[in-house]
Image: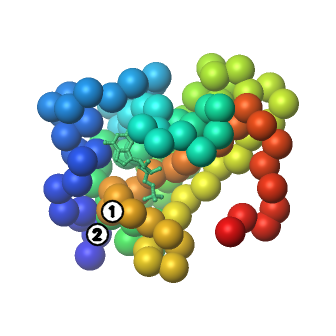
Amino acid sequence: MSAAAETIFSKIIRKEIPADIVYEDNLAIAFKDVNPQAPVHILVIPKEPIAQLADAESKDHALMGHLLLTAKRVAEQAGLDNGYRVVINSGVDGGQTVYHLHLHILGGRAMAWPPG
Ligand code: 5GP
């Protein structure tokens, strides 16, 4: 499986449901998580509906790099000068709940390790 089924994130990309969008370009969009787990909690997603990291392919090489650099850019924009965490949950054991690939940017507090 490489294409995601329709998810709530597809509706956010198409602006059919509201989201607090903090960054957008032709490949990616970033918006605040509706249920934040830190003072800053932003999701970066590709506009292309890849379901999960486990479905990314060699052809997605440049897009994957773009998503990571977008996370860096969004973290800078959010003022996370003291650091932050980037998380990708993939699949059931990864705790993924929305099957449209997304990077969580978490910041504004010190993170614990290991995560639960
Ligand atoms: P996952 O558990 O799949 O790694 O993360 C999914 C994230 O999407 C969760 O942190 C959840 O709070 C967030 N989320 C789910 N539905 C919505 C929504 O409709 N709007 C926004 N902004 N975030 C959502």
Say what secondary structure mark 1 lies in.
Answer: loop
Rendered-image quadrant of the C terminus:
bottom right
Quick check: can you spot residue 73? Answer: no
For label 1, count other residues whose C-alpha is less than 10 Å away and answer few (under 14), some (14-19) or many (20+): many
Q: Residue 63: x percent and y percent?
A: 44, 49
Above or below, comparing residue 113 to residue 27 in the picture: below
Q: Is residue 103 visible?
A: yes
Q: Which residue is mark 2?
A: 2
Left or right of 38 on screen, residue 95: left
Viewer-proximal residue, 10 or 39?
39
Residue type of the residue flagged with mark 1: Tyr
Q: Which residue is mark 1?
A: 99
- Label 1 beta carbon within 8 A of ligand 1: yes
Residue 48, image x and y in percent? 28, 49
Q: Position of residue 2 (x, y in %)?
A: 28, 69
Identify the residue at horizontal 71%, vertical 20% (top origin).
Answer: 79
Q: Is residue 88 left or right of residue 46?
A: right
Q: Nearer the viewer, mark 1 or mark 2?
A: 1
User: Residue 45: percent from the left, percent from the top?
Assistant: 41, 44
- Where, quadrant-wise, is the N terminus in this rendering? bottom left
Can you tell which quarter of the image residue 11 is in?
A: top left
- Along the horizontal axis of the image, is 11 left or right of 110? left
Residue in the image at 48% along x and 57% along y: 61
Residue 16, located in which quarter of the rendered image? top left
The answer to whether the residues at label 1 and label 2 have Cβ atoms under 8 Å apart is: no
